[in-house]
Image (cartoon, coloured by chain):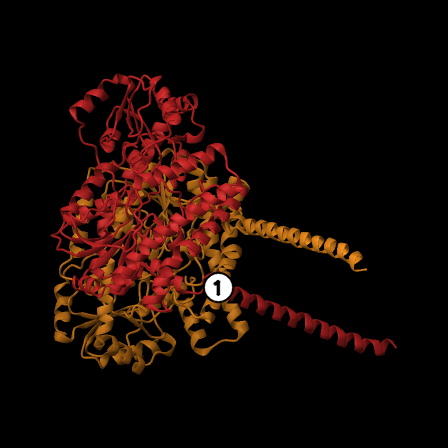
Chain colours: A red, B orange
Amino acid sequence: MGRLPEAPLLLLVVTVSFLTGPDVHAGKILVFPVDGSHWVNMNLLIQNLHAKGHEVTVVRTATSWYVKEHAPHYRSITVTLPQAIVIEEEEFFVNFLMKMLEIKKEGVSPIGFMKFYWEMLNALSNIHQQASRLGVEILENRTLLQSIRDSRFDVVLLDPGLPVGVLVAHELKLPTVFNVRWITSGEGHFVVAPSPTSYVPTSGFAATDKMCFSERVKNMLFYFLNTCIDKLVVCPHYDRLVDKYFGPDVKFYHLLQGADIWLMRVDFVFEFPRPTMPNVAYIGGFQCKPSIPLSPELEEFVQSSGDHGFILMSLGTLVKGLPTEITSEIAAAFAQLPQKVIWRHTGERPGNLGNNTLLVKWMPQNDLLGHPKVKAFVAHGGTNGVYESIYHGVPVIGIPLLFDQFENVLRLEARGAARAVDATALTRQNFLEAVQDVLHNPSYRSNMRRLSALHRDQPLRPLDTAVYWIEFVMRHKGAAHLRTESYKMPWYSYYSVDVCCFLLAVLLILKAAVVGSVWFVCFRLCRRRKPKQE
Amino acid sequence: MGRLPEAPLLLLVVTVSFLTGPDVHAGKILVFPVDGSHWVNMNLLIQNLHAKGHEVTVVRTATSWYVKEHAPHYRSITVTLPQAIVIEEEEFFVNFLMKMLEIKKEGVSPIGFMKFYWEMLNALSNIHQQASRLGVEILENRTLLQSIRDSRFDVVLLDPGLPVGVLVAHELKLPTVFNVRWITSGEGHFVVAPSPTSYVPTSGFAATDKMCFSERVKNMLFYFLNTCIDKLVVCPHYDRLVDKYFGPDVKFYHLLQGADIWLMRVDFVFEFPRPTMPNVAYIGGFQCKPSIPLSPELEEFVQSSGDHGFILMSLGTLVKGLPTEITSEIAAAFAQLPQKVIWRHTGERPGNLGNNTLLVKWMPQNDLLGHPKVKAFVAHGGTNGVYESIYHGVPVIGIPLLFDQFENVLRLEARGAARAVDATALTRQNFLEAVQDVLHNPSYRSNMRRLSALHRDQPLRPLDTAVYWIEFVMRHKGAAHLRTESYKMPWYSYYSVDVCCFLLAVLLILKAAVVGSVWFVCFRLCRRRKPKQE
């Protein structure tokens, strides 16, 4: 629509002026991050808060993978956990992936699957036990607690994937802001907003918002499963602490639900529309940014693709290897393409790699996705990669491997912007067919460009939205007016079960009274008539 | 918190740049307004859209009270309704108010009340019948319809208080934006978002979001009542049209629920926090603006109040008279105050008016509310006045008279920013006591100032939010990605009743199978043992 204002330009103007607004004086922010890929996001947010003049302090454990003790943009508090279970990131995820692929490909006996599931729950429980120990170490250490208190923080910013920070915030009587997509064992919305399972797919169940009956049944079962895991595996670790330090009147779940602002790493070009709450601000894709020029070597390689352009492939930061039987199929398919391929790969080099394929250990993913010659992105469907592809409008061939990647790829598929390939059934033929479909069917690209245009058309950049609401909470010491406290009601009151029972009882009594009266009158009339007839 | 950025300044910078952003080319907007005080809001929005270069066409009836045929900032389409019932605004509302006050004061027999209620429902039905006739006139008039079609509008902007515009939008296959607080016969959220009656007060029932059991029962009953009125009195007028022009597959309610963007005239400093949807944008208080200097005469009167300051009183645009027994009590109370009083009053002049009180037929309400010497605002609790008092941070003495005014004043009371006075029980003593309480208890003013600070601290000015989303819908031909279509599900699917029944049935069958098996095994064991024992 040529007659109407162009959104990205508009956006840029708003954003720039917002950032060059009034002088910003320092607030003090205490951060409880989650390690791994979550930290990539949190770190970006912290860098921006630091750049706006705020003083950021990050709480980390001595065995942290990613969160360094020293950094130019934050101070840190390092807590050493007794009997810390040091989980080797690479080993952990590669083993987990191998097992998953094996089960999906070879099948497994019910007992074998139960054993695997049990191990998974055990791993989940261990992770939360570690996190809750961090809480114990802080709440028991009076010197540390006093020094944190003396720092007079304005707000606690935390990733509630491991929600121990809410306990510390409660102890310090500080408002909280969540940088969230996952919380305890499910998606964040399920804790804060009404989530009808009839059209809101549950975490772990790859479905769209338009489900048939059997899908809705499965969705409900997944919801029950998630709730059970939450209540039986995750929450007990924190419940114990809350009970010990704050007494029986405080509930851990209420501390979660009572967060002032939820910065939700979601955008509705990606997520299906669903109910939300006034204290949820959407920052999906806040890590995205315009691309910058490539290095001369990479630019030369990319330019050598000519009109065919190039394809990008990366399976994310956490999973560094795929079984060779899969990688060699992928390599064989790539070798048949006229396009060039840049493949981020750290495992064994496939023997059948084509001349058109460049293996790299690291690549400037954002700059490559923003390059005019990029044609498609072969990705595992991690959230960061998905948002980068949306931002730059690059269609996706998804090979989901773990966790939410299946749901993420499905969301893009539902918008006609991606094609999924099952890793366990991947052959050079079906993979090549999928890649060629995405390359040659223009609908994938045009759908992704539409998503990109919608995603970029927001009153504020998502990153500015995040900073705005953190500063808002600091300015006003919370955001109570945006936050319902209905979660404090008993469930039967929240769902109006008591009211419905009462009204039903009144109706039944009324009905009984009416029927009784009619019966009584009829009885009297009959009695009066009978003597006359006699 | 001195160390943190000041919100209003920030807001101003964002806003100004937003408005002076890129060149704006004209979009074409078809508007279906609602007459009366609703038009004041819609007109302001139209003025802004016009100022941004858009071409606005307003659909009005020949008997419209407020919507003029000719205006510099819009074109108009005037439709003459056959057998139009010309309702005289002043007469209608004054009569209605008199009757209401009489009933509340004197009491009335149940039959008398039923008669009054019946008349009210009749009036409501008449209003919607008139509105639906507007739809018939447009949809039947092929020349008019073709000329509208030829105008190639980009969007239909409408106030769904009288929702006939959704039918025309459906006929023209155009996206819709609602400028809404009231819709058919309730509050807009109740149609678009989940609204648990356990903590969301229903339209017509003055309660907060923290209700005791009996209040929750009443709230549920009001919800049923509203639903009945909606389904039996309001919707049939439009259902008939939808059925006639679009066939049985289209439902009127789905047309309502399918609006692309809901510009909700609500702000959560005023409204209680409650579930919402991604396609709801909040523009509460979008009519508010900084005050400008008063006329020399008014400034002189105001300055003569010295340190005592002055009080403002207005009961809105629609209700032009109160019974003299009430106005003389108010005048007597005012006469006892050291403050000056400016009273917007068009009825009979009270005989006992004090020297400190200035009666005016019109006043620059916004500029007076923004004056440094204003101490309190005596108001009926209409939405516009409430938002102006929030914007300027002036505490309120509320005399609610009609409709939502009771709920509005209660919302301010719940925040400690207002005191309500019952018009039917108003005496000079209790009115004076309420005014003096608000004047001398600093909590009212500080609470209102807190609301004001929160209200002004938004990423975009509410008016800019409104314009932004209207332009968004024009740019992208709708906002389908923000809008759920779950309303198209049958109710038993939406509420997962079918899924729950199915799962319950499976559970019962499983239980029966287990019990049956156990019983069978026991029976066999018993039969085997018995012969042995014999």
Give the x, y percent position of residue B302: 15, 70
The local crowd at label 1, few if under 14, some if 14 to 19, many if 20 or more residues have their Cα within 10 Å, is few
At numbered mark 1, what does the secondary structure look like: helix, strand or loop?
A: helix
Q: Nearer the viewer, residue B183 or B445?
A: B445
- In the image, residue B349 sits, relative to residue B471, either above or below, namely below
Q: Residue at 52% of width from left, 68% of height from top?
A: B115
Give the x, y percent position of residue B388: 25, 61
* Image quadrant in which you'd find residue B255: top left
Q: Residue at 44% of width from left, 50% of height from top?
A: A226
Instruction: From the image, tell me which residue sits under label 1.
Output: A492
Q: Tell whether A340 sits left or right of A507.
A: left
Quarter of the C terminus of chain B within the rendering: bottom right
Q: Is residue B106 shown to the viewer in this render?
A: yes
Q: Residue at 37% of width from left, 38% of height from top?
A: A95
Callout 1: residue from which chain? Answer: A
Q: Nearer the viewer, residue B35 or A390?
A: A390
Q: Nearer the viewer, residue A350 or B417?
A: A350
Q: Residue at 54% of width from left, 68% of height from top?
A: A502
- In the image, residue B367 sits, relative to residue B47, either above or below, namely below
Quarter of the N terminus of chain B within the rendering: bottom left
Give the x, y percent position of residue A362: 24, 31
Q: Tell whether A529 sits left or right of B385.
A: right
Give the x, y percent position of residue B200: 41, 61
| Amino acid identity at mark 1 | Tyr
Q: Is residue B275 shown to the viewer in this render?
A: no
* Residue farthest right in this picture: A534
- In the image, residue A514 sits, relative to residue A33, either above or below, namely below
Q: Nearer the viewer, residue A205 or B356?
A: A205
- In the image, residue B485 sits, relative to residue B127, either above or below, namely above
Q: How many marks?
A: 1
